[in-house]
Image (tube, helix red, strand yellow):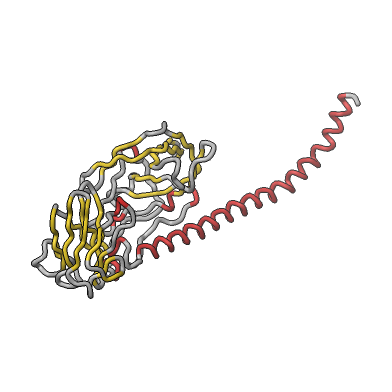
């Protein structure tokens, strides 16, 4: 077939091709639109379920809203109870619970009232106390109040009240509207093994935490980066971050966020719709870590939890 014949044949077929494209393209566009809409709806359902689970966790009788005290222990005997003549006065329970004895890293509780004070749910005259850094902490309770030992450079009692006003008046946490665009599939650059960073907490104490790498993503024409806390054994990576909403709509000491699984092929998925308040947003007795300078974003992250404002009873 000569070139002239090929050209003539093409000119004859060209209108038909255009007609076919005109017929197919709207359908393809509609399918694409439906897929996008379905993704947004699925994401909405997923985030709403995540928020419901978060609300249930905060509403538990041993959750962060029940924290009513942080009492530092001294070496030797620490008498505890609800009456004023104790070394540590608790928010409830019997007048004299007993004594916590501290000898270096050895801690022991001796009960003064085995009928009304339990140790890990059982009446007991005395028991060694396991601190939170050594495993599941030993729980000592009387009535609605309980305590266990934590270690933050030194030992302290973390005191909880299952009927604390903050819990009884809790009506939930406000959130930004769910926005699929804040579920970001970004780049991940793994750090050298052994990389760590010093993280300060609200008490001014400094702890070293392992850095697994950095998460990079583009937003509004700018590249942003967050350091990810974790190691090769982690199931997800942890971010402690601040942004342009911090103190201006979200909690003033930053927010927490976990990735969706671990990196794969140099990519990591992080959904900022799951950014949440640290325990310090709900009580003044927590020991929350603060965002490192590297994780202070020059960006308004209008996703996830807003600042918490308790309701009065």
Q: Is residue 103 above or below residue 220?
A: below
Residue 171: percent from left, percent from top: 34, 67
**Residue at image x 46%, y 55%?**
178
**Residue at image x 89%, y 28%?**
5
| Residue 119 in sight from this viewpoint | yes
| Residue 280 in sight from this viewpoint | no
Q: In which quarter of the image is the C terminus?
A: bottom left
- Left or right for 130, reference 98: right
User: Would you identify the image quadrant in which residue 173 lies?
Assistant: bottom left
**Residue at image x 22%, y 72%?**
114
Q: Is residue 168 above or below residue 282?
A: below
- Left or right for 6, reference 139: right
Farthest left residue in view: 85
User: Would you identify the image quadrant in which residue 283 lies?
Assistant: bottom left
Residue 7: percent from left, percent from top: 84, 29
Residue in front for this viewpoint, 269 or 177: 269
Residue 81: percent from left, percent from top: 16, 67
User: Would you identify the image quadrant in which residue 14 lies?
Assistant: top right
Residue 131: percent from left, percent from top: 27, 54
Residue in front for this viewpoint, 22 or 304: 304
């Amino acid at each position: 077939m000569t070139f002239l014949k090929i050209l003539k044949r093409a000119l004859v077929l060209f209108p038909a091709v255009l007609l076919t494209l005109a017929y197919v393209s709207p359908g393809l566009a509609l399918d694409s639109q439906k897929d996008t809409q379905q993704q947004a709806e699925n994401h909405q359902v997923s985030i709403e379920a995540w928020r419901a689970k978060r609300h249930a966790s905060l509403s538990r009788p041993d959750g962060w809203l029940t924290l009513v005290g942080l009492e530092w222990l001294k070496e030797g005997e620490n008498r505890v109870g609800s009456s004023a003549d104790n070394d540590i006065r608790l928010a409830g329970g019997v007048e004299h619970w007993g004594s916590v004895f501290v000898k270096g890293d050895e801690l022991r509780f001796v009960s003064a009232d085995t009928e009304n004070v339990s140790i890990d749910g059982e009446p007991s005259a005395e028991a060694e106390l396991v601190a939170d850094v050594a495993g599941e902490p030993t729980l000592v309770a009387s009535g609605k109040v309980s305590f266990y030992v934590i270690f933050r450079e030194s030992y302290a009692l973390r005191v909880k009240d299952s009927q604390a006003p903050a819990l009884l008046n809790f009506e939930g946490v406000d959130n930004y509207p769910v926005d699929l665009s804040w579920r970001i599939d970004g780049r991940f650059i793994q750090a050298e093994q052994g990389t760590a960073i010093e993280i300060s907490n609200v008490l001014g104490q400094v702890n070293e935490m392992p850095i697994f790498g950095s998460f990079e993503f583009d937003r509004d024409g700018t590249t942003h980066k967050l350091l990810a806390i974790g190691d090769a054994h982690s199931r997800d990576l942890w971010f402690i971050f601040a942004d342009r909403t911090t103190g201006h709509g979200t909690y003033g000491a930053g927010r927490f966020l976990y990735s969706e699984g671990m990196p794969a092929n140099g990519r990591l998925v992080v959904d900022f719709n799951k950014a949440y308040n640290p325990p310090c947003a709900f009580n003044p007795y927590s020991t929350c870590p603060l965002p490192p300078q590297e994780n202070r974003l020059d960006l308004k992250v209008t996703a996830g939890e807003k600042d918490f404002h308790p309701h009065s009873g």
